[in-house]
Amino acid sequence: MQKYILKRIFLMIPTFFGSTFLVYVILSFVPGGPFQKAIMQIKYSQMNLGKDAGVSQNNSQNLSPEIIDQLKKQYGLDKPLLQRYLIWLGFMKRAEKEKEVSAPYTFREDWDYVYTESAIYTIQRWIKVVKTGNNYEVYESGMGTDFKFSDEFDELPDFPEIIDWEKSQHWKVKSQTDEKIKLVKEKRSGILTLDFGNSYVYDEPVLKLIKDRIHISGYFGIIGFILTYIICIPLGILKAIKHGSKFDVFSSILIFMGYSIPGYVLGSVLLVLFGGGSFFDFLPLGGFVSDDWDKLSFIGKIKDLILHTILPVISYSIGSFATLTILMKNSIIENLSQDYVRTAHAKGLNKKRIILVHVLRNSLIPLATDIGGLIGIFLAGSYFIEKVFNIDGIGMLSFVSIMSADYPVVMGFLVINTIILLLGNLISDIVYALIDPRIRFK
């Protein structure tokens, strides 16, 4: 079992990279992305200013190459696709900052090194100077030379090793002319270092946006997940025992009615019924907690949270009730017709013991295989339900991000959902093996 789990964990790695790369490629070629939107906004602004009247908005030819290059650089499109993906992962360095420094004059030492000085910064650039006879030959290292801004040295130090410390703080030459040097500082940051980038819409780190909301959707999702199994398993057993009875028929009608009603529609109806509409007024209209949450006592906070939990959890879970209940019922009925059940009857065991001891465990196997998918569904949130109950959760954020082409947030959700689904499937296999001792993974 341990070897199987380790094997599955190792297989998760290529699955993760494959799925994220596929979506990354698709988003790179989907029209209407942030780069195209930025071009349209610039054109729209120019038209409003009367600078670009009468020019079609369907192409970027009317914009200067400098603007196009700057936009490509801003959205990371100035590099090949594979390189952009590796930078996003964190395998390759990305440009963190850029500076432009004037270089009006240089000083040459008699023997060893050359440095450039400006009025604001002292830049130490180590360039070897070799004396050949009476001539000096300067060997420059070219693009990518290490630079470091320093306030410590007003003149060239004796040993180049002095600035070898803290290599990550060094700057590199991006371009150079007689008058200016453009420098870039790079660092290795990406998904593997938990740097998901910044949102184009909210202008905040993606990880912060997700962390601020995931506990809300996770709270409703986990409670809904647990309640679904707690209710559906006993109900399925009872329906199987009383198959064909009035209880079975009546409960099936209610279950399938709930299944046919979308969660957000049911939520709206429940708000009208119990949230101060035309009938009752003892449940809040929405939100995660009340506005005066901080002023409540400990018991008051628990009560307030429970009241805010009831309606959203019902709306979240209603769609899964029918599937799990009928699946449990059919699995029980199928196992009741097996030979080992007839053998148990022949031994004189009562029906209750046969079902709870022998049949139930085998009947849980189909439900165990669905655990992974249900975990992902419940934790992903639902935009419509969160909109109805005014809950600022994952579903709301993901919908806004997709509609506004906020690709860093979209990719952040992809990473989290992929990990949750992969771990969920692993949990399903483990639970499967625990329920049925005949299962042996190799």
Image: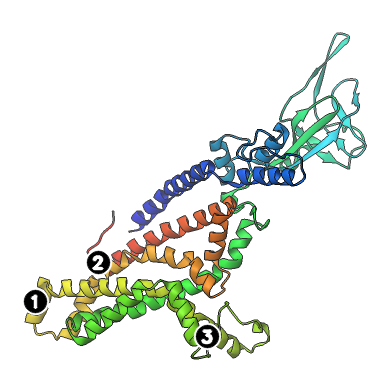
Q: Which element carries disc 3, helix, strand or loop?
A: loop
Q: Earlier in the sequence, mark 1 or mark 2?
A: 1
Q: Which element carries disc 1, helix, strand or loop?
A: helix
Crowd tier of the residue under label 3, counting other residues whose Cα lies within 10 Å: few below 14, some 14–19, many 20 or above? some
Q: Which mark is residue 29?
A: none
Number of the front mark, 3 or 1 = 3
Number of the front mark, 1 or 2 = 1
What is the spatial separation of the Cα atoms under label 3 and label 1, in whole angstroms? 52 Å
- Which residue is identified by label 2? 437
Q: Earlier in the sequence, mark 3 or mark 2?
A: 3
Type of colouring: rainbow
| Residue 328 x, y percent position in the rendering | 26, 73
Determine which quarter of the picture holds residue 91. Answer: top right
- Which residue is identified by label 3? 275
Q: Which mark is residue 342?
A: 1
Q: Earlier in the sequence, mark 3 or mark 1?
A: 3
Q: Residue at x 72, y 27 (%)?
A: 143
Farthest left residue in view: 346
Nearest the camera: 134 or 87? 87
Q: Is residue 437 left or right of residue 101?
A: left
Q: Name the amino acid type tagged 2.
A: Pro
Q: Name the amino acid type tagged 3.
A: Gly
Q: Residue at x 24, y 80 (%)?
A: 237
Farthest top residue in view: 133
Q: Name the amino acid type tagged 1.
A: Arg
| Residue 25 x, y percent position in the rendering | 50, 42
The answer to whether residue 261 of the structure is visible from this angle is: yes
Image vertical order of residue 290 relative to residue 60, above or below: below
